[in-house]
Amino acid sequence: MSLETLGWGPDFDLALSQSQPSSTPSLVPGRVVRQQRGLLTVQTQGAAFLARAAGRLRHQAVDAEALPTVGDWVLLQPPASGDGEALMHVVLPRRSVLKRREAGSEHDGQLIAANVDVVFLVVGLDGNFNARRIERALTVAWNSGATPVVILSKADLASDADERVREVEALAPGVDVLAVSARTGLGVEAVRARIPAAKTGVLLGSSGVGKSTLANRLLDAARLVTQPVRPEDDKGRHTTTHRELFVLEHGGLIIDGPGMRELGLLGGEDEGLASAFADLFTLAEGCRFNDCGHQAEPGCAVMAAVQAGTLSEERRASFAKLQREQAFQHRQADANAQRQHKRMQRTQSNAGWARTRAKRRGE
Ligand SMILES: Nc1nc2c(ncn2[C@@H]2O[C@H](COP(=O)(O)OP(=O)(O)OP(=O)(O)O)[C@@H](O)[C@H]2O)c(=O)[nH]1
Ligand SMILES: [Mg+2]
Ligand SMILES: [Zn+2]
């Protein structure tokens, strides 16, 4: 399998020439194509290897986000024997990275996929969809640096699919919204067209919305396990437990993974909100105060739009809530960075002292 087939592009050539460590010249590039718990599989030009991060990479990583995830391009040392594990030494700079605040964590990021071009946000038309959750997911998707596309799945079960498309378009400025049925094939070509050869898409959405069924349809084969949604609720069963990247017949690439319900925002990012709520950002330019919270401030152009009936109160509240969450995460991230900096300084000065002592001892 050639690296181009896996999505390698010219921007990685440059990254490669700059990241090849001189100490270990025998490293080969490959893409992480599968993750099952902590176990990664990397596809190189020649073969696929089970791989783990080399000690140095793990030690140098400031947090879990620096470690390889599905979609990453890595430089690895192939195993000495046929069935051993490869060692990943370098993660090449990412073009984009989709991540969320880990469920149950205050500020730790969890990686979902790297180097993706399109985030397909899959929402089932069989249940009642939640506009606020879509806004949140779009914010997370925009933050990745990739382009979001909303897929309203199971369109064969909805009599009002077109209406729902328009409803979602209204809360997703600049985002394409597609009604899709993996059962009848409706809209599947439109999905395929969003990931031409060597482009990578990732499926994001709650369990049971039909991500694997769609991936199978795109693959033109039943290679992924799917399961009926439990009749008593619409939460699905978490059928898919690992994450995997597939090369499609036409050359596009798609990543399927476990369903995710909670998508927490992380600090250090602003673009997501600015894109997901581009309409409100434009409005906010008319607010009297720069730091307007769009609640009860005098001269607030956002509140004025709500009063005029051109903006829904729910969308305003949703925006304000996500903005507060983002600001809180920013402060957490700053505090973390400061702690990290102090720790580094301490380690460095400890190392400095150790060297001085060693010198005194004549070592
Ligand atoms: N009617 C209809 N049912 C669908 C469609 N797509 C998926 N389903 C059904 O929805 C159920 C869940 O589909 P999956 O593909 O397993 O859902 P998933 O998003 O991969 O779920 P997790 O792996 O748990 O995250 C299955 O019973 C599918 O047959 C569709 O287009 N139409
Ligand atoms: Mg699945
Ligand atoms: Zn305002």
Image (cartoon, helix red, strand yellow):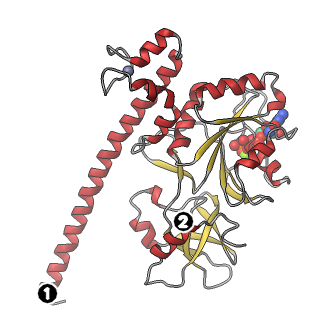
Per the image, the residue denoted by label 1 is 361
Image depth: mark 2 or mark 1 in front: 2
Percent from the top left, x then y, of residue 44? 65, 73
User: Between residues 111 and 151, which one lies in front from this camera angle?
Assistant: 151
Q: Relative to residue 39, is residue 354 drawn left or right?
A: left
- Residue 212 in view, yes or no: no
**Quarter of the rendering containing residue 295:** top left
Per the image, the residue denoted by label 2 is 11
Q: Relative to residue 132, is residue 343 drawn left or right?
A: left
Q: In what quadrant of the picture does the C terminus appear?
A: bottom left
The answer to which of marks 2 and 1 sits earlier in the sequence is 2
User: Between residues 65 and 139, which one lies in front from this camera angle?
Assistant: 139
Taking the view exactly as shown, the residue that stands out farthest to the right is: 184
For the point 44% across and 29% down, the residue is 281
How far apart marks 2 and 1 lie (CA) works out to 49 Å
**Quarter of the rendering containing residue 52:** bottom right
Percent from the top left, x then y, of residue 1? 73, 72
Q: Count neighbours of disc 2 (C-alpha within 10 A) and say few if under 14, some if 14 to 19, many if 20 or more.
A: few
Query: What is the count of numbered marks?
Result: 2
Amino acid type shown at disc 2: Asp
Work out whether 132 lies above or below 259.
above
For the point 88% across and 38% down, the residue is 184
* Ligand 3 image-quadrant field: top left
For the point 61% across and 85% down, the residue is 80
Work out whether 11 lies above or below 302.
below
**Helix, strand or loop under label 2:** helix
**Helix, strand or loop under label 1:** loop
Amino acid type shown at disc 1: Arg
Taking the view exactly as shown, the residue that stands out farthest to the left is: 360
User: Between residues 223 and 5, which one lies in front from this camera angle?
Assistant: 5
